[in-house]
Image (cartoon, grey):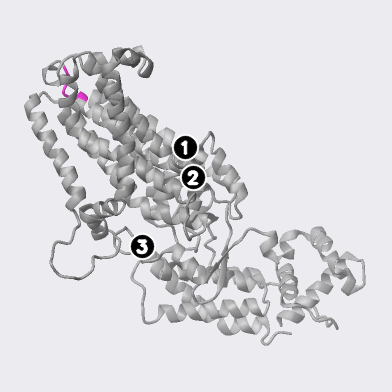
Amino acid sequence: MHELVDNRLNIETPEGVEFHRTPAGPLARLMAASIDLGIRIVVYIALSTTLFTFGNVGTGLLLIAMFCIEWGYPIAFEMYASGATPGKKAMNLQVLHTDGTPVGWHASIIRNLLRIADFLPLGYAFGIVSMAATSHFQRLGDLAAGTVVCYAENTRSTAQAQARALQIPRVEPVLIAETLTSEEQAAIVSFAERSRFLGPERSQEVAAIIEPLSGTDSGKENLSFLYGLANRIVR
Amino acid sequence: MSAISQQSFVEQHAPTWTRFEETLSEIEKDRTALPAEVFPEQYREICNHLSIAKHRGYSTGVTTPLNRLVERGHTLLYGARVSRQDVILDYITAGFARQIRAEWKLLLLSTAFFVIPALAMFFWLTTEPDWTYHVLGSRQMVSMEAMYEQPTSMRVDRESDSDVLMFGYYIRNNTGIGLRTFASGLVFGIGSLFVIAFNGIFMGAVAAHLHNAELSQNLWPFIIGHGSFELTAIVLAGMTGFKLGFAPIWPGRLSRMDALRKSARDNVGLVAGFAAMFIIAAFIEAFWSSSTASDATKYTVGTFLWLFVIAYFVFAGRDFSTSTTPEPAAPEITEITDPTDNQQVQA
């Protein structure tokens, strides 16, 4: 079902289990690219002001440095800074192989050399078209390298995440005659976990969807009905 | 409703998850080797839990942290990399030459795309000098004449520190052109071959023009040295770009996407190889070709450089032992984990 509505990258491990990552869209990536461009411009200015004082030798060194930065900057950071240039890090992005493993030398070199092809005819036009046309926002370089840029998962620990998520409002469990599918059960419990981040009005608005089962149109009653179902499922 | 309620599932297994997370954090932080006797087993247990949680429809509060644990474990277990040093050294001393030899037909084609236009231009413009104005344009002709007005060996006025400047310039310019030629192959396909032909036409025309102006005795000693690496690298850049662009056009038994991915992966070594050749050429051009050594010396050294390049591509990485053991499989800088293969196995 969700394959149709969301663009999550589902990765099947050799153990036969699927886990998922969330690919990042063009806007976040363009912003990351702009940050990287800004950083490089600052470095170029700093290098040129110092190196120009050394005459021809300095200029020669500057040109060599510019060559290395032009071609090596993204590769070096993707290899030694867990798959992210400073711009990507700032936008909480990370480069991965399409099988979910961290990007390696091969793929990093390919995707960054082919960046020029994505830049054509100007302003990453081909890259943006390619991202719009592929389900995981891959530019041409990503397609050739077999990589995808995903949001880096937050580093909150498992225990913290569970403590946060498993707090569902305790109410008296509700029994109903209908059988709920496992997807429906998961949706109800997830809603109960998250509702306190939504605010009361929005929670009641969302809860209105349960009206056919609860038989009431009062927002408050629908909400506590859902909490009741969640308590019944969880405990 | 479920076999075990969500809460008792969490209560039962939470200690296992915390323990596994501690192991993960430790390995990620210290980058130590995986404890082979316990790690895969622990990881599989977590995989099992995620499977169960999903199957029973437990909430995202349970599946999200488990998803994250599986992802981190997967990264550590399957994202392992081999040490790179010996692989790279092996590629330089043998693999690069082997890979080029394996593509000898394509190399022949690319070389033809360079040599034929160059020779044709040279003979045409030396017999019909007037056409040079149309091919090169008068401004280009004047600047070429100025460049080769006097032999390099006589240019004593040249500041020695400008060598470094020119080294930087050649690296940035020529290597950049090579890498761009490769990348443009992705968009223009066979266009890379025309980059080679364009270079052939230009160089043939310049040589013809200098010949007509009776200045070519200043050209050959200058270019023979770095030409060995640079001209070869131009041909290889065009050839590699062509290979990349042609793969999705003629994918064989693969899908077009897979053909592109495979071609890109197979050709990374070639790209690194020709980029290195451009850099070597830049070094020779800046510090040797422009030096004041006599023409005779430059011809001799240049000939040796050409022989070296040819000998490298002909002999490097060949197995000269008489044993009948097959040659090692196609050498490339391969990682243990191969994303494409992984997907194919599962498909």
- The residue labelled by disc 2 is A87
Which quarter of the figure is the N terminus of chain B placed in? bottom right
Q: Quadrant of residue B179?
A: top left
Q: Left or right: where does residue A71 sit relative to residue A94?
A: left
Badge 2 amino acid: Gly
Across and down, in percent, residue B59 comes to 67, 73
> Tag on residue B335?
3
Which of the two marks, 3 or 2, is nearer to us in this view?
3
> Tag on residue B226?
none
Q: Identify which residue, B243 or A231, lies in the foreground.
A: B243
At x 36%, y 45%, the residue is: B240
Please determine if labels 1 and 2 lie on a single subunit.
yes
Badge 3 amino acid: Glu
Q: Identify which residue, B306 or B156, lies in the foreground.
A: B306
Q: Main secondary structure of the magenta part?
A: loop
Is residue B41 visible in the rendered structure shown here? yes
**Start and end of the magenta stretch?**
B158-162
> Tag on residue A37?
1
Across and down, in percent, residue A147 comes to 49, 55
